[in-house]
Amino acid sequence: MKILYALQATGNGHIARANVLVPKLKERAEVDVFISGQNAQLKLHQNAVYNKGLSLFYSENGGLNYGKIFRKNSLFHFLKSVQNVKIEPYDLIINDFEPVTAYAAKLRKKKIIGLSHQSAVLHKMAPKPDKKYQFSKLILRRYAPVNDSLGFHFTKYDKNTFHPIIRESIKKLHCEKEDYFLVYLPSYRNAEIYKVLSQLKEVDWIIFSPFSNISKKQGNCTFFPIDEQLFTSYLATTKGVLCGAGFEFPAEVLYLKKMLYIIPIKGQFEQYCNYLALKQLGVMGSEDFNGVKLKHWMEVNHITDVSFTDDTDEVIDRIFKI
């Protein structure tokens, strides 16, 4: 059997999941990898065909950068990619929210299975924000259309929803709790992060930012450029984490039994869905970057008690049965 595994490279979660699933799939089939998108920091540990695709980009004040989204994405390039992508040699396409192969498969009537967090976000039982996000919800449904899908979420809503897949590098961490907090808020500029966190002088803040080119210490805040290995080492020994309302990274923090505080990216429907789902589990957070609320979180010292089952093998088995 020959499989094409296609994934999105906006954010790091799709890549983290592929680094676990693709080697497992290769034990049972011949697998090629296709990746599209322009806004991820995590490295894919597989040979792959890369495509510009369609990506989201973030502003420096906690929201989406619509100007950059418009400038960096080309509808003409996307349509040409859909027309030219080679999917005919494959018996099955596994699609992790990747639009080029999704539309190519739809147009050419090729067998495709969705395998993504977004599939579970759209589940009728998964929490969603109010009606003002109906257009964003429609975009999520149309972005990478598939007929059959399996999904990942913090809660299992049915037999087709699985817990997050945790990387081996995270499972193997030797964790301690030192008196600092780790920060990953890539949609906020460094000055805004410093403005808020410098007021919370009781602890040190270790901040990894796409806006940093060199490491720099400012008062109780230390800024680092994105570095996966260094970031993971700080994650192992941090007391808690302040981050956006993504999927894979908050799941890893919960798995490690660390304090977690989440702030959804403004205007990002999927992040608001994750925010609501995590709040249901007892995770603390807010829709704004607020020092008073963060101070309360620090004082409460709350760790959400949640456990995720390792569904990796079951997911692989289900793929071959669909």
Image (cartoon, grey):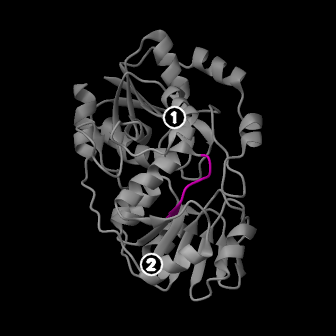
Which mark is first along the chain, 2 or 1?
1
> Residue 137 has which mark?
1
- Report the residue at 49% width, 65% height from top: 285
Q: Residues within 10 Å of mark 1 (few under 14, many from 20)?
A: some
Look at mark 2 in the image and give the residue it sits on: 237
**Residues at marks 1 and 2, CA–CA distance in whole angstroms:** 37 Å
Q: Residues within 10 Å of mark 2 (few under 14, many from 20)?
A: some
Helix, strand or loop under label 1: helix
Would you say 113 lies left or right of 66 here? Answer: left
- Report the residue at 50% width, 39% height from top: 47
- Report the residue at 64% width, 19% height from top: 79
Name the main secondary structure of what is drawn in magenta.
Answer: loop
The amino acid beneath tag 1 is Lys
- Report the residue at 36% width, 68% height from top: 256
Task: Report which quarter residue 263 is drawn in.
Answer: bottom right
Depicted 175 relative to depicted 271: above or below: below
Helix, strand or loop under label 2: helix
